[in-house]
Image (cartoon, coloured by chain):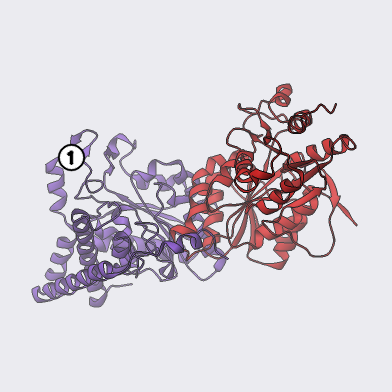
Chain colours: A purple, B red
Amino acid sequence: MKLGKKELILLYTNLVRARKGDEMVVKGIQEGKVVSFYHSGQGSEAVGVGVCTFLRPDDYLYPHHRGHGLAYVLSKGASLKAFLAEHYGRATGMTGGVAGFHGVDVEHGIFGGGGTIGSQFPVSVGWALAAKKNGRGQVTVCCFGDGSSNRGTMHEAMNMAAVWNLPIIWVCENNLYAQFMPIKDAYAREDIADIGAGYNMPGVVVDGQDVIAVHEAVEAAVERARRGKGPSLIECKTYRYRMHSEGAPDIAHIEPRPPAEIEAWKNRDPIKLFQKRLVDEGILKQVDIEKINQEVQAEVEEAEKFALDSPQPDPAILPTLLYTQ
Amino acid sequence: MRELRFIQAINEALREEMQRDEKVFIIGEDVQAGTFGATTGLVQQFGPERVMDTPLSETAVAGAAIGAAMAGWRPVADFMFADFMWCCADEVFLKAAKWHFIHGGKVNLPVVLFANIGGGARVGPEHSQCPESIVMHTPGLKLAIPSTPYDAKGLLKTAIRDNNPVVYFYHKRLGGTMGEVPEDEYDVPFGVADVKKEGTDVTIVATSYMVQHTLQVARELEGKVSIEVVDPRTLEPLDIDTIVKSVQKTGRVVLVDEDTKRCSITAEIGMQIIEKAFDSLDAPIERVGAANMPIAGGYMEQYVLPQPKDIVAAIETVIGRKLL
């Protein structure tokens, strides 16, 4: 699909929403309003936005854990209000305030947000299997980080999905660090995408700071999966600006992450890059940029107010959530 | 009434539920052949899309089953040996058990996690465990553990129809046992214990293959002591009321389960009896279980697993006299 002006502006707006939403959660942590922890996704928003903005509502998504999936779930249709309310421990949150931080939205096909890194792979095979059995052209998108790729679960799941030719897109957000562990000390090759060859599927590397590059790679893989051609692996090279989680040291092993490295990546900020491109192409003017900023700012502030105004969950619901009838 | 082998009763339950509901499918390693006969013959009737042989990947099998269940299907995942479920502990104890909750109650996980348990085959520490205590301990998992062909079929049908994750453990030494199974449709509800034998002197709560050991002991001691045998049939939900009612009648209790005795389900059931019926007890509760060590293989197995003589000794302790 050739993206028109409307779609390009939607991508841009989603990038800004993801950034400002993330900044709001970080602020909420600093102000003691967030009752959970937070793993900021600032710097890598182009991946989630590029992956999810044009998925179908009935496609299944396991969002990446960084930013608790914010860039992904917002782009797939989830509500920022519910996302913030969950982090603020409110009954209007994504899980009703009982799970703390999991960015799920069943109505939009967004499952998971599990607590164990690497557990996204096996269940995603299940959704892809269901997608195939359903026969409605759905796909599953399973997102993971460079750290997740160290788990054995990835092998089992990628192998099974390949053998069964399931409609699944594996999207790796390689931000160079698994908490404090540099990828170069945890993975023996340069590109995680190379793993695709071992499972008889395409493995491509894309610039994770370029939302269009991410979108195009995902679109091709989704199209392939919908046509019954099976899985694909996409590795997005990206970065996180902030520490692993709010309050944690910002280190590689035991040393600070190199300031020059952080600076270099900030110079390739996904929002600034895309904004420049849209301005250069005459799609956005300064006035449009300011208008989008204001609208998103209003959305974020309204979402925060909604969250803060919402009640805490009634503890009486807890026993009702153990089983369904 | 017609008699079936335990494993045939399981097979019949699977066949009937697959006929009844096209969302039901079986997934696991070598389920088309059926390593122990539970799923044998089903692929011929339902095809490989519904009886899915998988790569040797317990984690992916469990994940695929759980994910498909979340998306509206009703898988039965066969792990062969319950020991192998350790490989996919994340999927069983975090995903299956907690994801209804984590999704705010908005997704259901109608999945059956099916495996054989127990010793007796002398196949060593990693093919012989009875991991019911860890399952019962985990909020969010139901646990069915039949001891007869009738219960095996009826509980499995209920498990498949349940909208929650159900762990279904059948003992490998029960597979060949015969028992009455009606040809007419029936099921066995969860949370309803069955009094396998009535008695007045001692209540024995036993599970799975230990029910057979206990009934054998009760028959041998007939005339010397009157034993009531209660089989909970499901440990979650647990029908503590039927157990307490029996304890109130007999005043003496022996709890028998093949899992490692320390922290076993008998510890939980014993404590619940104390909480609910302490005044009815005429003697301290006795427990019988496997020794606190790996289940040995070969000729050593018998020294680790609970034997009928251990049940006799426990009965003698609670009644305060020798019987043999």
- Image spot of residue A255 (x, y percent): 18, 34
- How would you rate the neighbour count of disc 1 (Cα within 10 Å): few for under 14, some for 14-19, many for 20 or more? some
Is residue B9 visible from the viewing direction of this image? yes
Looking at the rendering, in which quadrant would you find the C terminus of chain B? top right
Q: Which chain letter matches label 1?
A: A
Please name whichever residue, B47 or A108, is drawn nearer the observer in this view of the structure. Answer: A108
Q: Amino acid at mark 1?
A: Arg
- Image spot of residue A185 (x, y percent): 30, 34
Q: Which residue is mark 1?
A: A257
**B83 relative to A254 in the view: left or right:** right
Looking at the image, the residue that sits furthest to the top is B300
Looking at the rendering, in which quadrant would you find the N terminus of chain B? bottom right
Q: Is residue B129 above or below residue A159?
A: above
Residue drawn at point x = 70 percent, y = 49 percent = B243
- Image spot of residue B139 (x, y percent): 52, 51
Residue drawn at point x = 16 percent, y = 61 percent = A273
Looking at the image, the residue that sits furthest to the left is A286
Q: Is residue B303 above or below residue A20?
A: above
**A249 relative to A204 in the view: left or right:** left
